[in-house]
Image: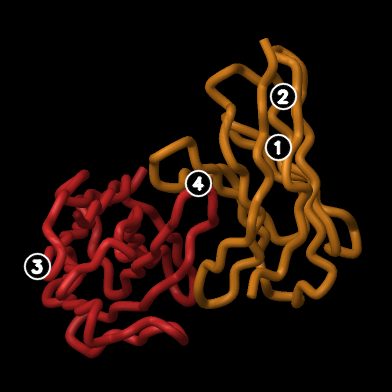
Amino acid sequence: DAKTTQPPSMDCAEGRAANLPCNHSTISGNEYVYWYRQIHSQGPQYIIHGLKNNETNEMASLIITEDRKSSTLILPHATLRDTAVYYCIVRDDKIIFGKGTRLHILP
Amino acid sequence: GAVVSQHPSRVICKSGTSVKIECRSLDFQATTMFWYRQFPKQSLMLMATSNEGSKATYEQGVEKDKFLINHASLTLSTLTVTSAHPEDSSFYICSARRSMGVFTYEQYFGPGTRLTVT
């Protein structure tokens, strides 16, 4: 079973920051938090991952709370092409997908 | 970034026939590959873990005699759906694990294969 909880859907206006929350209260000390997204009819695309420090790359930022029980993925300037299902995953040996958050970018 | 390919991208077959899907890691060697299945409006479900040179490990509820997995080389894993039925119609996605060092690895996903059984 997935170890994360995400809202089923969110809306964000184009050009604004999209903040996607994720709860992972049972995370273990050596488990990483990964984010993937899946655009319709495509394979999952890696976005970012982190252990306990905040991370940033060209796609997004990942903010992990100090107790590591939750995290937020931030897309700084959402575009219509960011419309997808976003999966927050606590990676053990295998990647198990939960239901994710369906992000709608509104023009 | 690392690239994983799948072939074919789409396939239509008749009920009762078998169909093979290939998954290749194009620029790295993958000792472990994974096969997922996704039904419409649902999340990806892990079917099995494929290790090079050994038998695949299937998740609970997945019929190993129906979904044959072969991982004969470090860059190729195949999934054969035997005696396919319309309920096997789905989006099949493979994933390959790439070692990044001792006890560290990343996992990359293929573009998926849409199987339609008529």
User: What is the chain identity of the residue bearing mark 2?
Assistant: A
Relative image position of residue A85 (x, y in whole percent): 59, 41
Relative to residue B50, is residue A76 drawn left or right? right
- Where is mark 1, residue-wise? A61
Relative image position of residue A2 (x, y in whole percent): 65, 69
**Residue A46, disc:** 4
Residue depicted at 37% across the width and 53% down the height? B109
Determine the CA span between mark 1 and mark 4. 13 Å
Q: Amino acid at mark 2?
A: Pro
Q: Amino acid at mark 1?
A: Ser
Relative to residue B19, is residue B113 drawn left or right? right
**Label 3–label 2 contact, CB within 8 A:** no
Relative to residue B79, is residue B44 drawn left or right? right
User: What is the chain identity of the residue bearing mark 1?
Assistant: A
Q: Which chain is orange?
A: A
Q: Which chain is red?
A: B
Q: Quadrant of the N terminus of chain A?
A: bottom right
Q: Amino acid at mark 3?
A: Thr
- Where is mark 3, residue-wise? B17
Q: Residues within 10 Å of mark 4 (few under 14, many from 20)?
A: some
Q: Nearer the viewer, mark 1 or mark 3?
A: 3
Which of B63/A23 is in front? B63
Position of residue B29 relative to residue A45, above or below, is below
Relative to residue A80, is residue B67 drawn left or right? left
